[in-house]
Every structure is written in structure tokens, then in C-alpha cells.
Image (tube, rainbow, N blue to C red):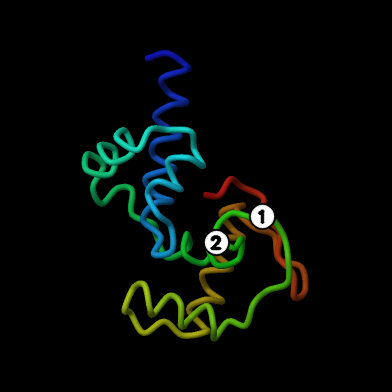
Amino acid sequence: MTHSADAESERLFRAARYAQFPDVRRAAAAARFGVSLGALRRAIRELGLTCRPRLGDYVLHTLTRGGTVTAGPLPELDSVARYLDYVNKDGSRPEDVARLLEELTREGMIELEGDRWRLLGEFP
């Protein structure tokens, strides 16, 4: 596989994952990552559950406002927990959000300093 094909596969995977967020339309995800809508639909179908966002991705989606900002103040953990419960129906609590933020920090995705965060990795 060529480097170009690898890059295309990575863009399709990221677009497929991004398209799974409740407020993201597939056409917007395709445009954002420069892939065709047909290719995105095929990727979502072929990847199935492997392209589903994990809970940490939903936290990143909230922090970055859908990938549009890379730093800012931490939101109220209760509001993030309500969003997680809305999308995942799991009864998320503020303590769960705090744990997810710690995991994202350990993974090198974000940096926390006081009441602020900064994105270190790529998202979406």
C-alpha cells in the first residue's frame, strides 16, 4: 500500500468516526476530511463498530466544540456528564468525566492546567 493510500485510509477512518457524533452530518464530515460522500458511506458500513467514538472522543468533541478550537476553559463537568448520558445512555456523572479527562491526559491527547485544557493530539 502506498503512502497516499495510507493517508486516504486514515482520512476515511477519521471522517467515519467524526460522522458518528450526533450533531455532525455525513456530508459535513466528508467535506471536512476531503473524501467523497460515497466513500464515507462505504467506510462507515465496512468499518462498523470500529469507527464508533469512544467516551473520551465524546469528551474531546465537547471540549473542542466539534474540532473547531484547540484550547480553552474546562466546561462544567456536570454539563459534559449530561451530554455523555444523552449520547451513551449510561448515567455518566461528573466523576466519570474527571476520570475521562485524566485518561485523555495520560494518553497525551490533552494537557490540563488549572481550569484550562489544551489539545495535544489530533481530533477529530
- Do the residues bearing badges 2 and 1 touch, measured as CB atoms within 8 Å? yes
User: Residue 37 appears in which quarter of the rendering?
Assistant: top left
Q: Which mark is residue 119?
A: 1
Q: Residue at x 40, y 60 (%)?
A: 21
- Rendered image: mark on residue 60: 2
Task: Answer few, some or many: residues within 10 Å of disc 2's Cα (few below 14, many 20 plus, some between 14 and 19).
Answer: many
Name, please, the residue furthest toward the right.
114
**Residue 13 higher or lower than 111, as above or below:** above
In three-dimensional space, the C-alpha distance between marks 2 and 1, rounded to whole angstroms, equals: 9 Å
Q: Residue at x 37, y 15 (%)?
A: 1
Indicate left or right for 52 with 28 as reference.
Answer: left
User: Which picture quadrant has residue 23?
Assistant: bottom left
**Mark 1 secondary-structure assignment:** strand
Residue 61 position (above or below residue 44): below
Q: Amino acid at mark 2?
A: Leu
Q: Is residue 87 left or right of residue 93?
A: left
